[in-house]
Amino acid sequence: MDIKRIVKAIISCAIIALAFAACSPKGPLAQVDQTEFNFGEVEQNADVVHAFVLQNKGDQDLLIKKTRSTCGCTVAEPDKKTIKAGQSAEIKVTFKTGRRKGEQNKAITVEVNDPAHPQIKLVMKGTVIERLTFEPKRLRFEDAEAGKELSQTATATNSGKNPITINEIKVNTPEALKVTLDKGGKTDLPITLAAGESLTIKAMVTLPKDKPFFSGRIDLIPADNPDNPVQYYISARQKGAVKQMQLSDKMKDLKAKSIKGGKFGTKGGKDKDEEE
């Protein structure tokens, strides 16, 4: 064989080997199956859960250093922090809708030891639907008299696309709050609202003397999703409660200043009896 050909063949093999080595992954290499998940439409007070898959395409351990979110309502939980070469991990992301409504876009940042991709952004997006809308948004009883029952009404409207049947009512403070529902004269449960229909909520509050401020919640339990109640909030305060609170705060400030200045029977931090 011609020596020149042999030399050329050797050089060609060397070049191919070097090119292959240059293209081969070195160190950890992070890759996700998807960076964005659209959950569509969900109701308020629901949990949206999705698992993103993070793969290590490198030849060294991929480490998940930290995860952080743009909102406390969104939490990321990787099933492991160290991902061996060629393996993968699931990052379970949970978004608690709470009382949020409308379009939502929640981001999670995953910090890894991949020098090429040190931060990976994952997104949960979709729309949170109010099954019931309330007018007013919250009932407030102001200047209430302790021991005297007061009542107000609110309107709840089915703002969804499907009928909703209320099977049960729960209140978090039954000793101070009573509730009835009325849809065109029907007050017995269950009550069904078609899309666009409304009912009246009557809330009756009786404040005890030892509670100048009150916060209550009504849970309307739907038949099709009893674990996800529609919640409505009520607040109340006794007459003069704000002034009493302000006066109490002033007295606390005066007492703190007096003690700091050595008053209330003391001088220079010593009792008068000790000085005598």
Image: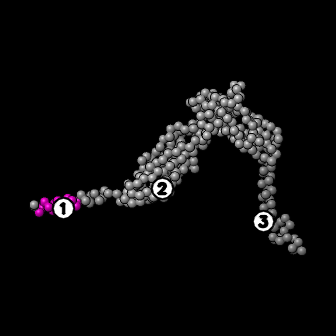
Check if residue 215 falls in the magenta segment: no
Q: Which residues are magenta?
A: 3-15
Q: Position of residue 137 (x, y in %)?
A: 66, 37
Q: Are discs 3 and 1 less than 8 Å apart at CB?
A: no
Q: Quadrant of the N terminus?
A: bottom left
Q: Which residue was labeled with disc 3? A: 260
Q: Quadrant of the C terminus?
A: bottom right
Q: Earlier in the sequence, mark 2 or mark 1?
A: 1
Q: Nearer the viewer, mark 2 or mark 1?
A: 2
Check if residue 9 falls in the magenta segment: yes
The answer for how far apart the CA atoms under marks 3 and 1 are is 90 Å
Q: Is residue 150 above or below residue 73?
A: above
Question: Measuring 65% from the left and 32% from the top, which residue is drawn there?
Answer: 166
Q: Which residue was labeled with disc 1? A: 10
> Does residue 6 appear left or right of residue 104 in this picture?
left
Q: Position of residue 87 (x, y in %)?
A: 40, 54
Tell me the kind of residue under disc 1: Ile
SS assignment at label 3:
helix
* Badge 2 density bin: few <14, some 14–19, many ≥20, Cα 10 Å: few
Q: Earlier in the sequence, mark 3 or mark 1?
A: 1
> Does residue 241 appear left or right of residue 226 in this picture?
right
**Is any atom of residue 115 visible in this view?**
no
Judge by depth and name the residue closer to the eye, 259 or 117: 117
Tell me the kind of residue under disc 2: Lys
Q: Which residue was labeled with disc 2? A: 80
Q: Nearer the viewer, mark 3 or mark 1?
A: 1
